[in-house]
């Protein structure tokens, strides 16, 4: 989740929890394309992920542009298209 002082238009890597009207809770991690590239370049220097040879994230969603509004637009689109549960992971009820 974004920090209290984080510029919401610049967010490029964030854990998301969506609560639907039926009470279900869903999670994913949203990255921008640029953030994935930045991470992989960093890993190529430090040897992580086979030296930046791959990117993998459970329940990851990659979007083209940074910002909470851009990410929310994609999530809304997934819901409207009936593809939301293909991308997001359902959380267990508490």
Image (tube, grey):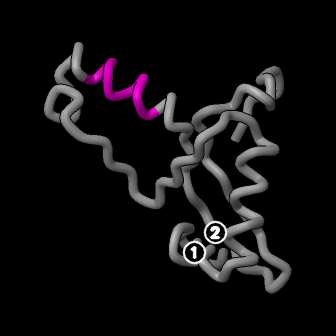
Residue 43: x, y in percent? Answer: 27, 23
User: Is residue 8 placed above or below 81 in the rendered structure?
Assistant: above
The CA span between labels 1 and 2 is: 4 Å
Residue found at x 65% / y 37%: 65
Front position in the image: 21 or 66: 66
Q: Earlier in the sequence, mark 1 or mark 2?
A: 2
Choose top left, top right, bottom left or bottom right for residue 94: bottom right
Q: Secondary structure at mark 1?
A: strand
Assess whether residue 87 is covered by the magenta stretch. Answer: no
Range drawn in magenta: 36-43
Question: In this figure, which residue is indicated by the disc labeled 2?
Answer: 26
Density class for disc 2 (Cα within 10 Å; few <14, some 14-19, many ≥20) is: some
Question: In this figure, which residue is indicated by the disc labeled 1?
Answer: 90
- What main secondary structure does the magenta stretch of the protein show? helix
Residue found at x 79% / y 80%: 23
- Circles 1 and 2, Cβ within 8 Å, touching? The answer is yes
Residue found at x 77% / y 55%: 73
Q: Quadrant of the N terminus?
A: top right
Q: In the displayed structure, does residue 19 sit left or right of residue 92?
A: right
Residue 85: x, y in percent? Answer: 58, 77
Residue 57: x, y in percent? Answer: 38, 51
């Amino acid at each position: 989740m974004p920090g209290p002082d984080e510029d919401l238009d610049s967010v490029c890597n964030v854990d998301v929890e969506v609560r639907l009207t039926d009470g279900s809770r869903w999670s994913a991690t949203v990255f921008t394309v640029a953030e994935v590239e930045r991470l992989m370049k960093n890993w190529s220097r430090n040897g992580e992920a086979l030296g930046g040879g791959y990117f993998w994230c459970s329940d990851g969603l990659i979007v083209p542009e940074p910002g909470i509004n851009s990410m929310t637009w994609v999530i809304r689109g997934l819901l409207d298209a009936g593809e939301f549960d293909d991308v997001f992971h359902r959380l267990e009820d508490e």
